[in-house]
Amino acid sequence: MADPSTNLARTIRKEAARLGFSATGFSSPVPQPLAMQRYNAMMSEHRHGEMAYMEERMEERATPEILLPGLKTIISAAISYNHPLHNTAGQPYISKYALIDDYHTVVRKKLEELLASLKTLLGKELNAIITVDSSPVLEKTWAEHSGIGKTGKNSLLIIPSAGSYLFLGEILVDKEITDNKPPLPNLCGSCSNCLESCPTGALIEPGKLDATRCISYLTIELKREFTPEESAMIGNNLFGCDQCQQVCPHNHHTTITADSSFTLHQNLLNITPETILNLTKSTFRTLFHGTPIYRTGLKRLKRNARAVANNLKTS
């Protein structure tokens, strides 16, 4: 007879697929010392730049039971935003994930639906919390532990058939759900496309990122004005950078594509630095409200646009 918990995992996975998730897995909250060692190394080597929040709540990262007393299972869910896009070399660039509705809202809503289905299935009280990039959770580690993906040399989670253009979310529950899916093997092999193609050398070795040289960090996370070196480093990138994903073979032959919830904002596809520099607070809101760019704010977006305009002028 099949383990009832395994049958439950199968049912949850089926419901998650109906909601648009590319992959769903289940982990028991066992200690992850290697992941914490790597995380602490990033902090001690100051590779996280000025993201001070990453230094906080370390105990909760290591012990997720603190977030949910009685925690038995971490449900990891991944969803694709891999819209096919053609980018003209040398033109201003906005990362794929920023051209759609804010994933925090979209993914959370889907996870709320999934949790509601789980509560109905169990027919009893269930304590749970949902996190979408909003709690100190080792997202990629738990996704790997659940057997749905593997972190690649570009430091991003790769899921077979879906690639790495993914958003991750978790449901922490006080119910044991077993699946016995083994971790995936290394998916990169001898490929080093991402390391060789990173325009700033932010990928200093396989899986090891120096955020202070990462264009995504500079254009999204960094709050202050750029130094002259940082301004030059971002090249033509107005917001984010997908270079390490664009060259990844796992993103070239995917059978799982962007979920229908993530429709492209067509008016953002060919936006110029000049358009951004002329925005007022009102027109900025009209153009970007509901997208990830709106969270960053007009001041930082104009900082990026000034740098890109200057880089394009001098290139």
Image: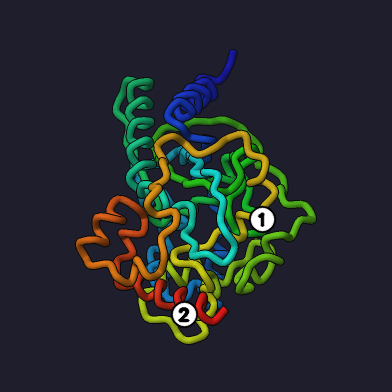
> Which image quarter: residue 146?
top right
- In the image shown, does 49 or 34 lie closer to the viewer? 49
Tell me the amino acid under the disc marked 2.
Answer: Asn
Residue 134 % position (x, y): 36, 54
Identify the residue at image location x=20%, y=62%.
Answer: 282
Q: Viewed as shown, does residue 123 lie left or right of 245?
A: left
Identify the residue at image location x=40%, y=48%.
Answer: 266
Residue 228 % position (x, y): 48, 86
Tell me the amino acid under the disc marked 1.
Answer: Val
* Image quarter in which the N terminus is found: top right
* Image quarter in which the C terminus is found: bottom right
Q: Residues within 10 Å of mark 1 (few under 14, many from 20)?
A: some
Per the image, label 2 sits on a secondary structure element best described as helix
Residue 240 % position (x, y): 48, 63
Identify the residue at image location x=50%, y=39%.
Answer: 258
Q: Viewed as shown, does residue 244 lie left or right of 129?
A: right
- In the image shown, does 161 or 57 lie closer to the viewer? 161
Q: How many marks?
A: 2
Q: Viewed as shown, does residue 292 lie left or right of 310?
A: left
Q: Hey, which residue is sitting farthest top in the picture?
A: 1
Q: Viewed as shown, does residue 191 lie left or right of 54?
A: right
Q: Residues within 10 Å of mark 2 (few under 14, many from 20)?
A: some
Look at discs 1 and 2 and give the one toward the viewer.
Answer: 2
Q: Hey, which residue is sitting farthest bottom in the picture?
A: 228
The residue labelled by disc 1 is: 247
Numbered label attached to residue 310: 2
Vertical position of residue 264 compared to residue 245: above or below: above
Per the image, label 1 sits on a secondary structure element best described as loop
Can residue 82 be seen here? yes
Vertical position of residue 49 compared to residue 229: above or below: above
Q: How is the image coloured?
A: rainbow
Vertical position of residue 26 compared to residue 117: above or below: below
